[in-house]
Image (cartoon, rainbow, N blue to C red):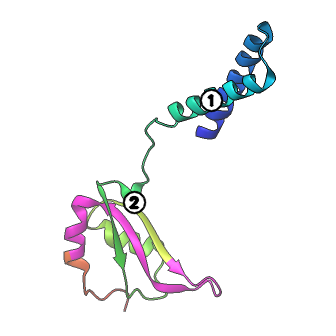
């Protein structure tokens, strides 16, 4: 989204600069330098808008490491298990790149308030054995 905005701003600046500089007898090198400075100023000003942070870094969520999972467990199984203790935003189970098989661990992103009770209840618990 930012690159489209910057493209539109620079195109608008180029049109305005072209119209203004055609009205005055300014050397081309000076026109170029003024255009570069104006574009740099415009881009530095437009990049100061706040951006939305990803869910994993949101302080209201917590990413939990989940290990010792059986290889037959899938994302929906793990999501259902953790959903008993609170809101689950994402589940990522790691897979071997060569074989495509699950590696027995993953990550669960859930509400920070629900994370500690889930850890207390599920730590050292047998699952799908």
Q: Which residue is mark 1?
A: 37
The answer to whether 83 appears left or right of 40 in the picture is left
Q: Which residues are magenta?
A: 94-119
> Is 105 one of the magenta-colored residues?
yes
> Is mark 1 in CB contact (under 8 Å) with mark 2?
no
Along the viewing direction, whichever of 101 and 80 lies nearer the viewer: 101
- Find residue 111 and report its horizontal and vertical position in percent: 29, 59
> Is 116 one of the magenta-colored residues?
yes
Residue 56 is marked as 2
Q: Residue 21 occupies which quadrant of the picture?
A: top right
- Label 2 crowd bin: few (<14), some (14–19), many (20+), radius 10 Å: some
- Find residue 2 and report its horizontal and vertical position in percent: 58, 39
Picture layout, residue 31 above or below residue 127: above
Residue 73 is marked as none
Judged from the image, the secondary structure of the residue bearing numbered disc 2 is helix
The residue most toward the bottom is 129
Q: Earlier in the sequence, mark 1 or mark 2?
A: 1
Determine the residue positioned at 41% across, 73% down: 107
Determine the residue positioned at 68% across, 22% down: 13
- Find residue 23 and report its horizontal and vertical position in percent: 78, 7
Judged from the image, the secondary structure of the residue bearing numbered disc 1 is helix
The answer to whether 12 appears left or right of 128 in the picture is right
Along the viewing direction, whichever of 27 and 74 lies nearer the viewer: 27
Picture layout, residue 38 above or below residue 78: above
Q: CA distance from mark 1 to mark 2?
A: 37 Å
The answer to whether 44 appears left or right of 113 in the picture is right
Picture layout, residue 8 above or below residue 51: above
Q: Residue 109 occupies which quadrant of the picture?
A: bottom left
Q: Quadrant of the N terminus?
A: top right
Along the viewing direction, whichever of 66 and 74 lies nearer the viewer: 66
Picture layout, residue 104 above or below residue 78: below
């Amino acid at each position: 989204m930012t690159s489209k905005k910057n493209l539109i701003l620079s195109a608008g600046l180029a049109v305005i600069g072209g119209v203004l500089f055609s009205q005055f007898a300014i050397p081309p090198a000076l026109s170029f330098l003024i255009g570069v400075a104006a574009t740099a100023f415009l881009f530095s000003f437009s990049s100061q808008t706040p951006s939305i942070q990803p869910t994993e870094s949101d302080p209201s969520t917590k990413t939990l490491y989940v290990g010792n999972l059986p290889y037959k467990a899938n994302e929906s199984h793990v999501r259902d298990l953790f959903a008993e203790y609170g809101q689950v935003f994402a589940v990522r189970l790691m897979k071997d790149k060569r074989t495509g098989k699950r590696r027995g661990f993953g990550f669960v992103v859930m509400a920070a308030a629900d994370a500690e009770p889930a850890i207390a209840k599920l730590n050292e618990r047998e699952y799908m054995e």
